Image: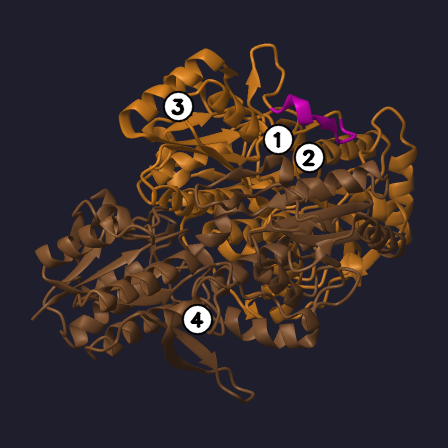
Chain colours: A orange, B brown
Amino acid sequence: MANCLVAQSGGPTTVINASLAGVVKANQLNPVYETVYGGLNGIEGILEGRLYDLTNMSELENRILKQTPSSALGSCRYKLKRDDDTDYRRLVDIMDQFDIEVLFYIGGNDSMDTVDALSQWAKKNGIAKRFVGIPKTVDNDLMVTDHCPGFASAAKFVNAVVTSTWLDYNVYTRAEVFILETMGRDAGWLAGSSVISDKVDLLVLPEEDFDQDNFLKQVKNCMDTKGKCYIVVSEGAHFADGSYLAAADAKNDGFGHAVLGGAGNALKNMILDAGIAPRAKVQDLSTAQRCANYLQSYVDVEEAFKLGMSGHMRSADGEFTGQVVGVVRKEGAEYDVDYIAGPASEFANHVKNIPAEWILPDYKGLTKEAYEYFTPLIQGEPDLIMENGVPAYVKPYHMR
Amino acid sequence: MANCLVAQSGGPTTVINASLAGVVKANQLNPVYETVYGGLNGIEGILEGRLYDLTNMSELENRILKQTPSSALGSCRYKLKRDDDTDYRRLVDIMDQFDIEVLFYIGGNDSMDTVDALSQWAKKNGIAKRFVGIPKTVDNDLMVTDHCPGFASAAKFVNAVVTSTWLDYNVYTRAEVFILETMGRDAGWLAGSSVISDKVDLLVLPEEDFDQDNFLKQVKNCMDTKGKCYIVVSEGAHFADGSYLAAADAKNDGFGHAVLGGAGNALKNMILDAGIAPRAKVQDLSTAQRCANYLQSYVDVEEAFKLGMSGHMRSADGEFTGQVVGVVRKEGAEYDVDYIAGPASEFANHVKNIPAEWILPDYKGLTKEAYEYFTPLIQGEPDLIMENGVPAYVKPYHMR
């Protein structure tokens, strides 16, 4: 019997470990693989042979792993080169060394691209290794799947922070603007999800070029009408020339992506400079939004876990490779999903944006289709195991 | 039978409404007052005669009020003048108009000072009005009481964010500094509470003058040892000359207090400029930390509610005025408190700091006495009523 390997990559989420827990649990229910190895720090650690045996994880550890935020196996930003197969061969050597037939790779856009590249290369070279993708990303920007594990919990946290800070900024009668900045480099799903709180006056998304004059006009209208204005902005908001509102802070993460942050402050400065409001506060959710294990969405945790199981279960078919698992929403009033799988090439390297027809003009938010899309995703809370006043977590495997 | 009035002032907290719910519920258990009025937007609204009848609030509304963050009656930053009794006389006129004998004032340092001033003035002028203080402040800096309602929930949130972001920043092997900024203008209790997470490498408090050279030396030691450094800083951290680390952003809130924010960024810039770490991330908890109703401390909510009840119950004694209720920790291994009351003058206008003997040298955190102090406060979570994926809340009375 061969073994399997599971690894995590890219920016972590609140439920990326639930998918890991799902792979491990599926193998306990049906031991298709003799050993389930965890690859530490993604491809980077695997190439160094750093593996951790997860096969016999206890039920309690599996349960706590589901509520542990961030990547318990560690992550990496290392991208396998497509034009030079040195890394691919090293990876296969490691897999041979540990008798590993299948790699489950839990990650976002780049990782799904890696799954596609590896499986194509293996097929072309007659190498009997298989590669399966399990999606995650708080950005929710993968194609094919209705939504991405990790997104819904982040959206739940965004909605909770919007609601509670909206209550806070309304205690005073003074004129004030509140600006909440969320993650979302190329797609505005996370910022957009805030509309279901019914607290957001203006929404600034990366799906549209930012028009400073019209935006300031809308802020002024809002201040004139109610003396307050609650704004949500995505970190990736940009001007028509493509430059980010947060451009002054832009750096590079080594993948050619700008490291953003500061769109909220940019809006604050515009509003104060224009004299539209005497006071503006910025709340940048930063890292906290992708690891808020104290407010996971039940729907999200369960789907992430089941996608891990689904990936494992489908891999029992020896032809299953270069595929990514996902969910498709069923028709009907009650929220439910079908678990599906499709070619990694179709999931990766395209950014799924909020449909243009959902976006209301003048930064006024989103249509009711968006409410119907987002609302079911943030429902329910898992019954957390607490320790010393905060959610219990599994000690990261790469730190043991 | 006379009536009573309850109002909220200053910056809101996650449990300031639990104290309000306690006053209302106590009067339902023993109707000492015919009507319980809520004063809208603190003293400011009361002087305008804006009152709301809370007497017959339903049990469900009372329960949801306990989990509603921010001040459901609204707040104000208006401070009654001590050297001119025009405002005092207007207040008494309003109280006469509504046949109000007692004012319960839920607030922080400034509000407890107001309770003291009003009760002294009333006594001196033979006016049969009484004034009772119920403490709240995330800063935890009031004297006499062991701790202040609102602090423990904020501390629980701080610990949850520290734990989850620590897990997040550890996924990569790269050298990195993470800096979490908390509230705490003059006292470092909230930043200090983070030590019980056992994740904090360096702690920067307002209780000590900031020594940049020694701080950078400690960051360097930490980076040399483990390649990572997790720092928590209080917004009120300052240099020996009294200037805030965040001085560049300092403004004024009208009370003569500096409006802070930016200590984290100041540390980040120092560290990057000194070339000690190639990368540093700042998470400023900002408004979210004082209204995180999705992670209230059970101990905090219950004590806040009971302090509201205690204030009401003690006020049945016609001599009870100029007093503030509080808690004193009982001796013994099991956490428990005695509910006490004392003169407002003793609670107000002094800042209670973290004891100097609890503070370890070289930004290394706090002694075990601090662990024993903080740990019981953040235990337990109330059973929240959720609505549309986030905690249900009572629509603010000043917005109805």
User: Is B376 one of the magenta-colored residues?
Assistant: no
Q: Is residue B337 left or right of residue A28?
A: left
Give the percent coordinates (x, y) of residue B105: 30, 61
Mark 4 vs mark 3, CA separation in Å: 58 Å
Q: Which residue is mark 4?
A: B346
Q: Can you say whether B154 is above or below A216 in the image?
A: below
Name the residue beneath numbered marker 2. A112
**Tag in front: 2 or 3:** 3
Chain under disc 1: A
Q: Is residue A289 visible?
A: yes
> Measuring 49% from the left and 86% from the top, which residue is drawn there?
B330
Nearest to viewer (mark 4 / mark 1): 4
Distance between the alpha carbons at the discs numbered 1 and 3: 22 Å
Up-down relation of residue A379 to residue B192 (above or below):
above
**Magenta segment boundaries in residue numbering:** A246-255
Q: Position of residue B149 (x, y in %)?
A: 43, 66
Residue on which the image places disc 3:
A358
Image marks 1 and 2: residues in contact by CB distance under 8 Å: yes
* Residue matched to label 1: A347
Q: Nearer the viewer, residue A57 or A256?
A: A256
- Assess disc 2: are there few (<14), some (14-19) or many (≥20) residues with their C-alpha within 10 Å of its C-alpha: many
Q: For the residues carrying marks 1 and 3, which lies nearer the camera in this image?
A: 3
Which badge, 1 or 2, comes first in the chain's sequence?
Answer: 2
